[in-house]
Image (cartoon, rainbow, N blue to C red):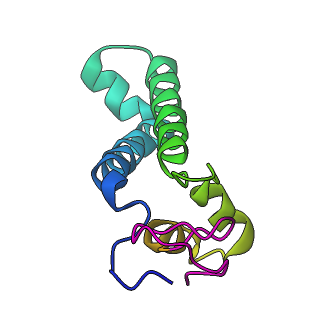
Amino acid sequence: MNNSGETILARQQWKIRITGILTVLAVPGVFVPDTFASFLGVEPLWVELASALTFIVAFAFAAWLSRCPNCGLNLLFYGMRHEHVGSWLAWSLNVKTCPRCGYSLSGRENSVGNAG
């Protein structure tokens, strides 16, 4: 395991945080579109569509960013499939060694295993 303390996604953290913020901002537009629609002077359907599209694009971008640089394993989806419901996101953001190829930022080959 990588003991340097730097996660595989450390260099992508700011981009992933931005996508998280966009996701959080999109959620109210889906659940209370009338409030935003009256403020913006548009139909609630347009607010719902824009919010849903923002959520989908932000999540897809976060998933694209969270890949192993060596083998391309999507760590976000891997975490969703293999970790507990309450811990998949934390695991995905804090993984230090790729579970498929053993890649770590330390630059040396590691044995394949769970970084949890």
Q: Residue at x 41, y 66 (%)?
A: 105
Tag count: 0
In front: 28, or 74?
74
Q: Residue at x 53, y 41 (%)?
A: 64
In front: 37, or 80?
80
Q: Residue at x 35, y 52 (%)?
A: 12
User: Which x, y percent locates residue 17?
Assistant: 32, 53
In front: 112, or 108?
108
* The residue stretch that appears in magenta: 97-116
In front: 115, or 44?
115
User: Which x, y percent locates residue 25?
Assistant: 34, 43
Is 10 placed above or below 24 here?
below
Q: Quadrant of residue 114?
A: bottom right
User: Which x, y percent locates residue 34?
Assistant: 41, 30
Q: Residue furthest right?
A: 81
Q: Is residue 39 left or right of residue 42?
A: left
The secondary structure that most of the magenta stretch takes on is: loop
Q: Is residue 64 left or right of residue 18?
A: right
Is residue 85 a member of the stretch shown in magenta?
Answer: no
Q: Residue furthest front?
A: 108
User: Which x, y percent locates residue 78?
Assistant: 67, 62
Is 10 placed above or below 39 here?
below
* Quadrant position of the C terminus in the picture: bottom right
Is 115 placed above or below 101 here?
below
Q: Residue at x 52, y 20 (%)?
A: 45
Q: Is residue 46 left or right of residue 80?
A: left
Q: Is residue 44 left or right of residue 25?
A: right
